[in-house]
Image: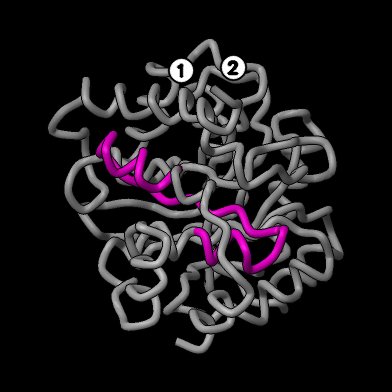
Amino acid sequence: MTQTDALPAAAAGTFRIGGDLPVNRLGYGAMRLTGPGIWGPPADQDGAIAVLKRVVALGVTLIDTADSYGPHVSESLIAEALHPYPADLVIATKGGYRRTGPNLWTPQGTPAHLRAACEGSLTRLRLDRIDLYQLHAPDPKIPYEESVGALADLQREGKIRHIGLSNVSIDHITRARALVTVVSVQNRYSPQDRASDDVLAYCDREGIAFLPWGPIGFGKGLQGTTIERVARAHEATPIQIGLAWLLARAPVVLPIPGTSSIAHEEENVTAATITLTDDEIRSIAKG
């Protein structure tokens, strides 16, 4: 058995976030481990723990979460399932939302909120320093530089190793880069949702990791003649082909599909072993 057979997430190669955090390019997003509306605990906590253990066993070395998932539930589950963490595992988390109920998300980018969010994440994840801490979203009520500056303070204090951004435009990125080194950007992106094409091109040019969230269209957005035709040719599912297309899109792309099912996680990770032809990549890009 080869390493790729045993650890399929390794098949798509690695990327060094910030130059010093090597991760296998196909990661895992831990949002879906919570209750309905990304609120409260999962109906099956043991099942959620089992999914996280299987994620690591499949060779995933990047897990993305946030304090707002639950809130707090996802981070606590990760620590319960995986602490003490494997030496090669990078846990990325985020702060910048206030949650008041299921499916309710309010940007909260004050320095005080971000400090409390980061320190809470450190406690729940049982870490002394978070390898990648991301500003979850711009808060229209707060100057963006104030929010980024709060993360810069936490980085200087040794609580954050690297800083990332989420749900941003190129303008947000360039403003943040005037204050800090930005190593990652996380925006919604999939083969059929490409509003962030310009942001991805910027990240590719600048060597910044691009983490597409919603990379498989939340399980509903990857149907269509082209993707289904390519899937049949590879004896794969449309979801697998969508993830393979993202991996082929640019070397900085680190998809983070999420699921609460071991079977779906195994399906997702197998996408790293699929190599698309240039014609297939172009055809999917055209839609």
Check the image and name the residue furthest to the left.
43
| Viewer-side residue, 230 vs 286 | 230
Q: Amino acid at mark 1?
A: Leu
Q: Around disc 1, counting alpha carbons within 10 Å, would you say few (fewer than 14), some (14 to 19), or many (20 or more)?
A: some
Residue 280: percent from left, percent from top: 53, 76
Q: Amino acid at mark 2?
A: Pro
Please name the residue that numbered disc 2 is placed on.
86
Give the secondary structure at mark 1. helix
x 51%, y 83%: residue: 283
x 67%, y 72%: residue: 200
Give the secondary structure at mark 2. loop
Horizontal arrangement in the rendering, residue 23 relative to residue 187 (left or right): right
Check the image and name the residue furthest to the top.
84
Asked where in the image residue 220 lies, by quadrant, the reply is: bottom left
Residue 126: percent from left, percent from top: 53, 17
Q: Which residues are magenta?
A: 244-269
Q: Is residue 252 magenta?
A: yes
Please name the residue that numbered disc 1 is placed on.
82
Distance (Cα) linking label 1 and label 2: 8 Å
Q: Is residue 275 magenta?
A: no
